[in-house]
């Protein structure tokens, strides 16, 4: 690590979020600029354009020319959120990695609540105690969380919360597969990392449309759970005698 290594990398998956991009970046830049670490070290904000077709791609390029901290990568088509996150993680170099959605449903200021806990925990998850989504999404998410907790015992209320802060080694250890971004706490615990959660605010989506619903999330997640449970049983854990 050198003084030019970013103290934090923010990773944002983007599919058709044109009108959210400018306000989102303004709030993130304000929050991160105000942080004491930014006095001595840089930070970076990485946006991965997952095949947007609403003008987000052009807007992202425009914003990147205005702010040197902003880096933009474009996929050649839509691959889904896990791919976008993975591409962002792999192109980041921050010591701390902050995951947030591009839909303005989270509050950038809540990052400041999560960050201090990285002193004691490897993964800090947001917990949307008062979710502002439609009734179907809220119910399906509650069922999924209950079932998941029964199988994984991760003890986290809201594993799907898009606001999370990781210490770098967590993401270096976890190999992602499609849909696995919904299981970060169980995957981190399985590798011996420490996990905690913090209540965060949540807002209704104002611009753009939600891309996930019952059909493409609830049933897929239940299927993915079998894979996660299997990995938990088979994970390699060993320690050298003198280590
Ligand atoms: N997203 C993405 N690729 C997709 C679908 C969504 O990168 O194929 C992004 C989207 O732009 C947003 C985040 O993933 O930043 C979460 O998507 P969305 O808000 O639609 O999901 P929800 O919050 O409704 O579950
Ligand atoms: Mg959303």
Image (cartoon, helix red, strand yellow):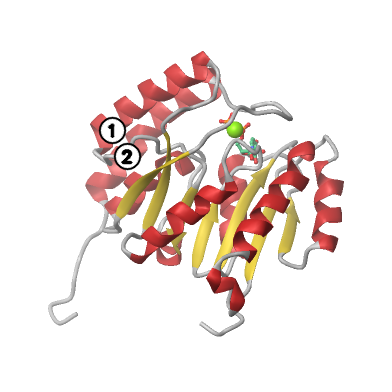
Please tell me which residue lies in front, 137 or 241.
137
Name the side, left or right, on which 204 lies relative to 69.
Answer: left
Q: Between marks 1 and 2, how big is the CA–CA gap?
A: 8 Å
Crowding around mark 1 (Cα neighbors within 10 Å: few <14, some 14 to 19, many 20+) is some
* Left or right of residue 155: residue 81: right
Q: State yes or no: Cβ of the residue under disc 2 lies below 8 Å from any atom of ligand 1.
A: no
Residue drawn at the location 61% of the way across and 57% of the way down: 31
On the image, the x and y values in percent for residue 37 come to 54, 72
Q: Quadrant for ligand 2?
A: top right
As drawn, the label of residue 149 is 1
- In the picture of the structure, the residue carrying the numbered disc 2 is 156
Q: Is residue 69 above or below residue 219?
A: below
Residue 65 picture location, percent across and down: 85, 62
Residue 223 location in percent, x, y?
40, 28
Camera-nearest residue between 58 and 218: 58
Residue 134: percent from left, percent from top: 55, 17
Can the viewer see residue 212?
A: yes
**Residue sitting at the far bottom:** 2
Nearer to us of marks 1 and 2 is: 2
């Amino acid at each position: 690590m050198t003084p030019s290594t970013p103290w934090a990398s923010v990773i944002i998956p983007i599919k058709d979020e044109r009108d959210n991009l400018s306000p989102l970046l303004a709030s993130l830049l304000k929050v991160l600029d105000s942080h004491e670490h930014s006095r001595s070290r840089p930070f970076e904000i990485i946006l991965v354009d997952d095949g947007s077709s609403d003008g987000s791609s052009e807007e992202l390029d425009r914003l990147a020319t205005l702010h040197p901290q902003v880096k933009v990568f474009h996929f050649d088509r839509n691959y889904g959120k896990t791919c976008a996150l993975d591409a962002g993680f792999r192109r980041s170099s921050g010591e701390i990695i902050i995951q947030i959605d591009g839909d303005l449903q989270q509050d950038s200021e809540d990052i400041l609540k999560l960050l201090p806990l990285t002193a004691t925990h490897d993964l800090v998850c947001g917990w949307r105690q008062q979710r502002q989504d439609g009734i179907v999404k809220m119910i399906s998410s509650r069922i999924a969380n209950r079932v998941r907790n029964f199988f994984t015992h991760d003890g986290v209320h809201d594993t799907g919360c898009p606001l999370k802060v990781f210490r770098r080694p967590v993401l270096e250890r976890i190999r992602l597969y499609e849909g696995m971004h919904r299981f970060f706490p169980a995957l981190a615990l399985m590798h011996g990392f420490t996990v905690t959660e913090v209540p965060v605010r949540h807002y209704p989506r104002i611009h753009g449309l939600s891309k996930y619903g019952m059909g493409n999330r609830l049933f897929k997640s239940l299927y993915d759970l079998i894979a996660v449970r299997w990995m938990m049983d088979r994970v390699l854990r060993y320690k050298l005698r003198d280590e």
